[in-house]
Image (cartoon, rainbow, N blue to C red):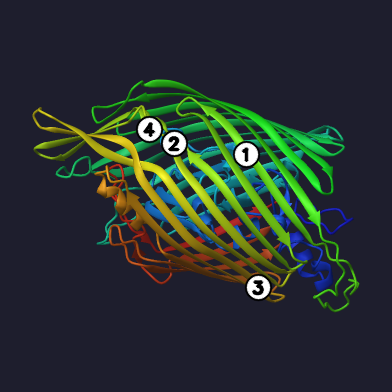
C-alpha cells in the first residue's frame, strides 16, 4: 500500500509500509472519510491524474494492497481481478489475455504499458506476458480502462488500455528481501531490492529477481515439460532540479528460457523447443509544473529478442513523447501533445515461417488534442451522509456539474498512412455519491508485420501443404464503440461501478484462399484479408463493501455477447470459431478479513463460463491466503490457489502449434523481510 496522508499532513515514512497500514486501522470513520480508498486516482483514462468518480470511462484500479492480499505473484494473474477482462493460461509460460472479447494468445486489441512505456510487439500487435515482470511490492497500482482509448493513446488501444505504475524511488527506501516456494507454478522466487537517498536529494532503488516455474500437467496429470525460468534486474532514480521540475530515470534487463512442446503438423509428433528471451529498456521522464498546468517529456529505448524453433525476432524501439496540460480555469481544460516512434526489427526466418523483407524499419508520427469543459450546476441540498462526530455541515453545497470531453489523435504510420481516432465523452456528477457517464469513440488496429509481410507454411497432412501469406493491402481493423456507466460511492463503505457497452467492428482479419499450386505435394495458398465484421455487447459490474472495520467484500460480474459475421465473399469459416474463445459469464467474490493487527485471512472465488471452442468446461477457482506479521519488518504468507480442483484447463485452441496444458493446484509459502 502506498503511503497516504491526510490533507495538510505529511505522508507516513516510506520506509515502513506496514506502519501505514496500522495507522489507517487506528483512524476514526470521520478521519477515514478524508482518504480516497473508495475513489482511487489514476492517469490512464485521461493522461492526467483524476478520480474514479470524475472519469468518463470504464476504469478499474488494482491497488498494491489488493495485489498483496489476493496472493498475486505475476502481473497477468492480477488482471483476473478486473471485470470484463478475459485471462486464461495456455501452459506454464503463456497467457491469453484480452478485454471485452477477441481472446487468444496473440490478442491484438489491447494496449499495455509499464510506466507509460508500451510493451506491445509490432510483430502481431500482441503482448508477451511471460517477460513482463518486476518485484510486485514496487508496483503502486495497475490502471485498466476497458473500451477504446485511441483518442489519447493511439492505434491498437481498441478494447482497452492497461498501465502498470511503479512506485517512486522515494517510496521504496530501505531494503527488501522476498522469497517464495511453491508446489507448482512459481516454485522458487527470490527478489532483493535496495533503496535510499543521496546527499543531493535524489532517491534511488535497484532490484534483482530470480524466478523458477514448474511444468503444468496434461489431462492425465502427466507433466508437459513447459517449465521455465527468468532472471531480471533494474533500477529507478527520482530527483528534482527546481521546485517545479521533477525527473525520473529507470531501466530493466531480463533473460530467461521457456520450454514448450510444439506440434508442427497435424500428422507429426510433438517436438520440444526452448524459447530464449532477452531484453532491456531505459526510460527518462521530465515534468515541469506550470502556473496553470504542467509539461511532460518522456523518451525510452526498448530492445527485445526472442528465439524459438530456430526463428529469431530482434527489435529495437525508440519513442519520444511530449505532452502539454493547460488548466484555463475551473471550467475549461486543454491537453495536447506530439510523439514519434521508430522501430527496427530483424526476423530470421525458417523453412516454415519467413518475412519479406526480413529487416524492416517503421516510423510512427502522432499528435493529439483533448478539451474538457465543465458546466457547474450549483445547488444546495442536505447531505445524504450522516456520520458520527462528522464535521460536515448538513447544508454544505455539493458540487454538481456536467462535464464534456472531446478529442482526437491523428497518426501516420508506414502501413496504413493517416489514421484519425476521435472520441466524445460526457459525465454528469449528480451529487457526491452518484455519477453517470457516456461516450462515443472510434479506434483502429493498424496492420502488423505479420498481416503484411509473413509467409507461414503448415503441413496439414502427408499429401497437402498450406501456405498463409501476408497481404500488402491489408487494412486497419475498425471499431465504433458506444458506452455508458453509472457509479455510486458512499465513501469508505460502498462503491458500485457499472458499465454497459455496444461495439461494432469492421474489416476484421480473415484468411482467404487465393490459389492451388500444381506442386508435389499440392500447395494451397491463403491470403490475409479484411472480410469479417463483429458486434459485441455486454455489462460489467463491480461492488466493494466495507462490511465492518475489519472485513471488506468485493464482487465483480461481466456478461459478454460476441457475434461474428463473414462477408459474402469470404470463405474463412474457421474465423467464426474465435467467438467461442471468450466466456459469456465471468464473476468473482473476494473477502479480505483482518483477524487481528498481525493476522489476516482472505478468500478469492472466481467463476469462468465455458469456452465452446475446444470444449473447455466452466470452472470455479477458489484461492485462499493467510498472512501473519509477527514483527513490523517480517511478513509470512501461506496460500493455496485452485483449492477446489486438482487441475483444470483454461483455453482450448492450440495456436502456433503449442500443445496446451492444465493449471494445477498450487500451495505456496512467501516470506518478506524489510530492513
| Figure check: 310 above or below 183 | above
Q: Secondary structure at mark 3?
A: strand
- Between the C-alphas of marks 3 and 4, the distance is 48 Å
Q: Secondary structure at mark 1?
A: strand
- The quarter of the picture where the N terminus appears is bottom right
Q: Secondary structure at mark 4?
A: loop
Q: Earlier in the sequence, mark 4 or mark 1?
A: 1
Residue at numbered disc 1: 408
Q: Are marks 3 and 4 in contact (CB under 8 Å)?
A: no
Q: Mark 3, residues whose alpha carbon is within 10 Å: few (<14), some, or many (≥20)?
A: some
51 vs 211, nearest the viewer? 51
In this view, the residue farthest toward the front is 568
Residue at numbered disc 3: 545
Q: Earlier in the sequence, mark 2 or mark 1?
A: 1
- Between the C-alphas of marks 1 and 3, the distance is 37 Å
Taking 85 as reference, is 338 left or right? right
Q: Mark 2, residues whose alpha carbon is within 10 Å: few (<14), some, or many (≥20)?
A: many
Q: Earlier in the sequence, mark 3 or mark 2?
A: 2
The answer, for residue 332, to whether it is visible in the render is yes
Expressed as whole percent of the image width and height from the top left, the position of residue 203 reads 76, 38
What residue is rendered at 65% in x and 59% in y?
437
Residue at numbered disc 4: 474
Q: Secondary structure at mark 2?
A: loop
Which corner quadrant of the image does residue 302 belong to?
A: top right
Amino acid at each position: 500500500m502506498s503511503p497516504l496522508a491526510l490533507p495538510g499532513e505529511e505522508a507516513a515514512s516510506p520506509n515502513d509500509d506496514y506502519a501505514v497500514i496500522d495507522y489507517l486501522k487506528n483512524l476514526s470513520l470521520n478521519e477515514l472519510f478524508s482518504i480516497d480508498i473508495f475513489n482511487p486516482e489514476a492517469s490512464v483514462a485521461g493522461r492526467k491524474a483524476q478520480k474514479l468518480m470524475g472519469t468518463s470511462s470504464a476504469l478499474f484500479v488494482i491497488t498494491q494492497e489488493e495485489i498483496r492480499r489476493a496472493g498475486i505473484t505475476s502481473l497477468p494473474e492480477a488482471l483476473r481481478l478486473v471485470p470484463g477482462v478475459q485471462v486464461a493460461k495456455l501452459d506454464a509460460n503463456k497467457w491469453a489475455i484480452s478485454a471485452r472479447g477477441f481472446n487468444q494468445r496473440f490478442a491484438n486489441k489491447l494496449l499495455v504499458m509499464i510506466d507509460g512505456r508500451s510493451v506491445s510487439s509490432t510483430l502481431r500487435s500482441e503482448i508477451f506476458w511471460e517477460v513482463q515482470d518486476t518485484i510486485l511490492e514496487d508496483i503502486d497500482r495497475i490502471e485498466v480502462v476497458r473500451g477504446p482509448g485511441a483518442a489519447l493513446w493511439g492505434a491498437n488501444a481498441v478494447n482497452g488500455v492497461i498501465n502498470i505504475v511503479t512506485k517512486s524511488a522515494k517510496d521504496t527506501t530501505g531494503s527488501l528481501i522476498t522469497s517464495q516456494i511453491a508446489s507448482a507454478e512459481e516454485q522458487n522466487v527470490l527478489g532483493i531490492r535496495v533503496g535510499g537517498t543521496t546527499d543531493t536529494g535524489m532517491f534511488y532503488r535497484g532490484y534483482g529477481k530470480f524466478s523458477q516455474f514448474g511444468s503444468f500437467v496434461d489431462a492425465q496429470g502427466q507433466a508437459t515439460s513447459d517449465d521455465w525460468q527468468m532472471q531480471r534486474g533494474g533500477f529507478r532514480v527520482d530527483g528534482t532540479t527546481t521546485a517545479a521540475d521533477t525527473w525520473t530515470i529507470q531501466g530493466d534487463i531480463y533473460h530467461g528460457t521457456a520450454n514448450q512442446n510444439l506440434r508442427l503438423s497435424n500428422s507429426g509428433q510433438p517436438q520440444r523447443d526452448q524459447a530464449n528471451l532477452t531484453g532491456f529498456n531505459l526510460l527518462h521522464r521530465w515534468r515541469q509544473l506550470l502556473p496553470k498546468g504542467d509539461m511532460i517529456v518522456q523518451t525510452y529505448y526498448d530492445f527485445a529478442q526472442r528465439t524459438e524453433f530456430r526463428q529469431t525476432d530482434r527489435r529495437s524501439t525508440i519513442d519520444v513523447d511530449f505532452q502539454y496540460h493547460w488548466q484555463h480555469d475551473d471550467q475549461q481544460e486543454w491537453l495536447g501533445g506530439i510523439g514519434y516512434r521508430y522501430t527496427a526489427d530483424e526476423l530470421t526466418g525458417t523453412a516454415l515461417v519467413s518475412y519479406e523483407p526480413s529487416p524492416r524499419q517503421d516510423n510512427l508520427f502522432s499528435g493529439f488534442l483533448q478539451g474538457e469543459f465543465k458546466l457547474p450546476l450549483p445547488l444546495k441540498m442536505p447531505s445524504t451522509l450522516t456520520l458520527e462526530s462528522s464535521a460536515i455541515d448538513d447544508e454544505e453545497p455539493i458540487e454538481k456539474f456536467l462535464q464534456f470531453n472531446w478529442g482526437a489523435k491523428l497518426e501516420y504510420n508506414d502501413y496504413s498512412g493517416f489514421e484519425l481516432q476521435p472520441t466524445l465523452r460526457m459525465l454528469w456528477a449528480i451529487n457526491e455519491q452518484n455519477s453517470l457517464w457516456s461516450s462515443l469513440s472510434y479506434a483502429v488496429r493498424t496492420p502488423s508485420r505479420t498481416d503484411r509481410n509473413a509467409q507461414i507454411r503448415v503441413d496439414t497432412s502427408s499429401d497437402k501443404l498450406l501456405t498463409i501469406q501476408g497481404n500488402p493491402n491489408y487494412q486497419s481493423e475498425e471499431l465504433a464503440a458506444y458506452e455508458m456507466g453509472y457509479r455510486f460511492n458512499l465513501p469508505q463503505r460502498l462503491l458500485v461501478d457499472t458499465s454497459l457497452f455496444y461495439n461494432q467492428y469492421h474489416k476484421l482479419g480473415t484468411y482467404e484462399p487465393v490459389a492451388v499450386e500444381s506442386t508435389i505435394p499440392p500447395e494451397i495458398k491463403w491470403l490475409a484479408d479484411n472480410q469479417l465484421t463483429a458486434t459485441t455487447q455486454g455489462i460489467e459490474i463491480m461492488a466493494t463493501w466495507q462490511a465492518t472495520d475489519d472485513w471488506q467484500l468485493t464482487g465483480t460480474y461481466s456478461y459478454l455477447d460476441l457475434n461474428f459475421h463473414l462477408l459474402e465473399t469470404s470463405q474463412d469459416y474457421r474465423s467464426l470459431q474465435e467467438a467461442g474463445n471468450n466466456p459469456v459469464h465471468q464473476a468473482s467474490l473476494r473477502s479480505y478479513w483482518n483477524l487481528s493487527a498481525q493476522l489476516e485471512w482472505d478468500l478469492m472465488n472466481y467463476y469462468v463460463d465455458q469456452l465452446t471452442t475446444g470444449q473447455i468446461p466452466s470452472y470455479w477457482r477458489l484461492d485462499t491466503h493467510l498472512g501473519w506479521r509477527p514483527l513490523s519488518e517480517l511478513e509470512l504468507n501461506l496460500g493455496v490457489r485452485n483449492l477446489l480442483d486438482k487441475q483444470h484447463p483454461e483455453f482450448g485452441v492450440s495456436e502456433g502449434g503449442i500443445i496446451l496444458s492444465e493449471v494445477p493446484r498450487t500451495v505456496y509459502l512467501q516470506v518478506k523481510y524489510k530492513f
